[in-house]
Amino acid sequence: PLGTTYADSALNAATTYNYRVSAYDSAGNHSPKSASVIVTTPSLPPVGDTSYGVYSPTAVMAIDGNTEEFAAAEEILLTNASGSEGRYRLLYDTEALYLAGDVTDAQLNAIYTEHDGNLWQDDSVELVFDTLGNGGTALDSDDYKLFVNLLNIHLDSNGSDKIWTGMYESAVVPNGSVNAAGFDAGYAVEMKIPWSTLGMTCPASGNMLQFNLGFNDRNDAGALEQTIWSG
């Protein structure tokens, strides 16, 4: 091209390219090619958005309510008006996406004991995945909603299909007296969500996956608070 600068935008991440330059005039005469210039493009960010990166675990994951495997993962902190806190971390491998939550809550409450109950009205964690990243105000066939409450009960849907049942594992360990008077400190929750449950294969490193994370909190009087993180 004319000029002394050139921008090459059709490049892949984490790839080395070799450039040589030749000048030419209006008569079509070309100079010898320059020495090579070697450049390497940077890697894309990890799976996740610019504010949260999801990485691979360093050990075999056990879904048992012990969240120590997630210690090195980045944290999403959600705090509600009552002072309860949810600290959430995610990891992934070729099989599944993993979530751990460590919740501080002085009032542990959950009343729904059957699958697909109104778990947003309990102490629970809620995940909504937009696997195509196409947004919208309504849930489509590429959107998946998964809940786990304090009693380790599931609620799940795929788009507008409320009957759909997702195949995923979870474990919840309360620290206190659920639905009873006494000392309550909080609870730990773990989830293993196979990529196949979300209708997809494991994203390549650097790909983006849009999701919302909800921290649902029910107090002793039945009042509800929901705190949402979106990425």
Image: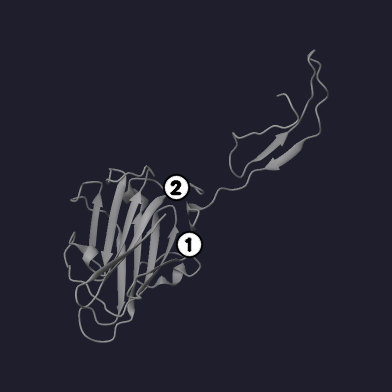
The image shows residue 131, relative to residue 8, as above or below, that is below
CA neighbours of label 1 inside 10 A, class few (<14), some (14 to 19), many (20+) = some
Foreground residue among 215 and 46:
215
Q: Amino acid at mark 2?
A: Pro
Considering every residue shown, the one lying at the far bottom of the view is 182
Q: Nearer the viewer, mark 1 or mark 2?
A: 2
Residue 59 in view here = yes
Q: Amino acid at mark 1?
A: Pro
Name the spot of residue 97 as percent of width and height, x first: 39, 56
Q: Quadrant of the N terminus?
A: top right
Foreground residue among 193 and 228:
228
Q: Which mark is residue 222?
A: none
Q: Which mark is residue 57?
A: 1
Q: Secondary structure at mark 2?
A: loop
Q: Residue at x 79, y 20 (%)?
A: 24
Q: Quadrant of the C terminus?
A: bottom left
Q: Secondary structure at mark 1?
A: loop
Q: Is residue 169 left or right of residue 206?
A: left
Quickly name the residue at label 2: 203
Foreground residue among 223 and 64:
223
Quarter holding residue 2: top right
Q: Earlier in the sequence, mark 1 or mark 2?
A: 1
Real-space Cα separation, disc 1 to disc 2, in angstroms: 15 Å
Name the spot of residue 130 as percent of width and height, x first: 35, 48
Name the spot of residue 223 as percent of width and height, x first: 22, 72
Quarter holding residue 8: top right
Residue 54 in view here = no
Name the spot of residue 83 as percent of width and height, x first: 35, 76
Considering every residue shown, the one lying at the far top of the view is 27
